[in-house]
Amino acid sequence: MKVAVFSTRSYDRYFLDRANIANNSPHQLEYFETKLNSKTASLANGFPCVCIFVNDVADQTTLKILAEQGTELIALRCAGYNMIDAQAASELGLRVVRVPAYSPYAVAEHAVGLILMLNRKLNKAYNRVRDDNFTLDGLLGFDLHKSTVGVIGTGNIGTIFAQIMQGFGCHLLGYDVNPNEDFTAIAGAKYVDLPELLAKSDIISLHCPLVPSTYHLINQETIQQMKQGVMLINTSRGQLVNTRAVIDGIKSGRIGYVGLDVYEEEDELFFEDHSNNIIQDDTFQLLQSFQNVVITAHQAFFTKDALIAIAQTTIANISSWEQGNELINEVKVSETN
Ligand code: NAD
């Protein structure tokens, strides 16, 4: 089947080609480096399947164009589904599949990496030693052992993250609208309501999806409820966090450390080389000017193991639809509210 694959880089093509060749009846994958949006949707004219990634724009206008051009299946190469208007897709008769779990370890481990980097100031320490400066002033950290870690969203990634932090000897608090017994099975982990998690955690890590009810979950009001000097980690989706409120929280000292792999307005920046451009996003520039902020460009998923799994599940999802089989990884409108 003809598949228009948007937002592709060399690594996407490499792993998708390998998974596709291994498939019994390989699909015809046509790669586009550009993002999908209403202006580029015409590239997919005549393609029954369109395959997209986190910063593509599958809004109602774009989906309508795709449907009119003959697209019937949208295959997301990711777990999150906030970039697609699932209601509009359903009304247009488009089926939507995703990769619900590829390597939760990749994302959980990256969140831990951000914590270690922020706490022990590894970014500064690395540069200092490269500069033949062997002083320790300004590099003081704290023991993770016995600190309290709040996990918001205890699904696949949140629970693995919690297991790793348990290994450091942390106390674990969880908040989730659907409690998960794998989380409570972790020694010492317990569920609390959101205000208690905010008030007691030294480190707060976000692992819930971006849906209308979680948009700006971290805002002026929730930040006020956090411990003085808290560490905030977001490897989930940028719009879970009101960035202006976080900046105010950093300036007031309420937030002591911020580690982000995602950013509210990342679709204008991430996955592109802007090193020769003037970045126009003043909020982003201000955010990254703080010494206690570390930002990575949506790379938490980016391990070999994850890319192999993403490619295999994506190809399997497309084959299932082509063969009229049950779509086990279908995104249902009811999940997206
Ligand atoms: P999951 O579905 O297994 O877990 C999400 C959990 O969040 C569920 O337990 C759910 O009940 C909970 N949740 C939903 N609404 C909530 C709310 N209002 N408050 C608290 N909890 C709520 O998903 P997952 O595989 O663990 O992935 C989590 C998120 O990580 C994804 O939605 C995606 O946005 C993000 N992600 C980021 C990257 C990256 O590279 N940075 C990669 C993959 C996934």
Image: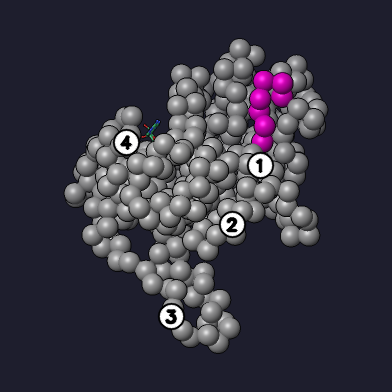
Residue type (three-letter) at the residue carrying disc 3:
Leu
Q: Residues within 10 Å of mark 3 (few under 14, many from 20)?
A: few
User: Marks 4 and 1, Cα distance to the nearest angstrom?
Assistant: 29 Å
Q: Residue at x 80, y 30 (%)?
A: 39
User: Marks 3 and 2, Cα distance to the nearest angstrom?
Assistant: 23 Å
Coordinates of residue 126 in the picture (x, y in percent): 52, 76
Q: Which residue is mark 1?
A: 267
Q: Residues within 10 Å of mark 2 (few under 14, many from 20)?
A: some
Q: Nearer the viewer, mark 4 or mark 1?
A: 4
Residue type (three-letter) at the residue carrying disc 4:
Leu
User: Marks 1 and 3, Cα distance to the nearest angstrom?
Assistant: 37 Å
Q: Is residue 210 left or right of residue 36?
A: left
Mark found first going from the N terminus, 1 or 3: 3
Instruction: Determine whether 288 is above or below 138 in the image.
Output: above
Residue furthest out toward the left:
188
- Say whether mark 4 is within 8 Å of ligand 1: yes
Instruction: Determine whether 287 is above or below 331 in the image.
Output: below
Q: Nearer the viewer, mark 2 or mark 1?
A: 2
Q: Residue at x 75, y 20 (%)?
A: 65
Q: Which residues are magenta?
A: 56-62
Q: Is residue 155 left or right of residue 276?
A: left
Quadrant housing the N terminus: top right
Q: Which residue is mark 3?
A: 136
Where does ligand 1 appear, by image quarter? top left
Q: Which residue is mark 4?
A: 194
Compare residues 13 and 302 and report the one nearer the observer. Answer: 302
Q: Which mark is residue 288?
A: 2
